[in-house]
Amino acid sequence: MTAPSMADEPRHVRITVDGAMGKVVIDGTDISRSLQGYSLQHQVGGPPVLMLHTVPHRGLDFEGLAHVAVASPEQDDGQVVAAFLANIDPAALERTALERDDLDGSRHELTVAMLRQLADWAQGRG
């Protein structure tokens, strides 16, 4: 039997950060002690995606309005990037890239703007 995936249903998420320390609460349950980190990505027009990186050998018990996925320790960077890119709305990317202030009129300005926009979204900016 496989564990239920929390990625299918949006969950209420609250993250508070005070310097280097953070608190992650999902549906009213503080799960911070079970985490070694998290990544939050949000694309305009869709719900945020919260990737949880759990502490090895420690249980994670929570109910689960972001889509939540628990990262696999075996997941490599390429898989993480591919999952991020799979959730990108091409129309939103093009529209947002064309509205950037740093377009420079060069031959490949749209491609450069799209790559910069993807980097911004990956880092939680804009």
Image (cartoon, grey):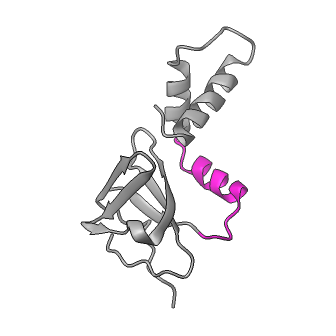
Q: For the magenta stretch, what is the residue range?
A: 72-89
Image: 42 above or below 2: above
Residue 52 appears in view? no
**Location of residue 57 by image quarter:** bottom right
Image: 63 above or below 104: below
Q: Where is residue 34 in the image (x, y as percent from the top left)?
A: 44, 72
Give me the residue at 67% from left, 8% from top: 105
Identity of the residue furthest to the bottom in this view: 1
Q: Where is residue 14 in the image (x, y as percent from the top left)?
A: 30, 55
Is 83 included in the stretch rendered in magenta?
yes
Describe residue 34's horizontal placement relative to residue 112 as left or right.
Answer: left
Residue 93 appears in view? yes
Give me the residue at 32% from left, 74% from top: 63
Image: 96 above or below 88: above
**Location of residue 73 by image quarter:** bottom right
Q: Where is residue 71 in the image (x, y as percent from the top left)?
A: 56, 66
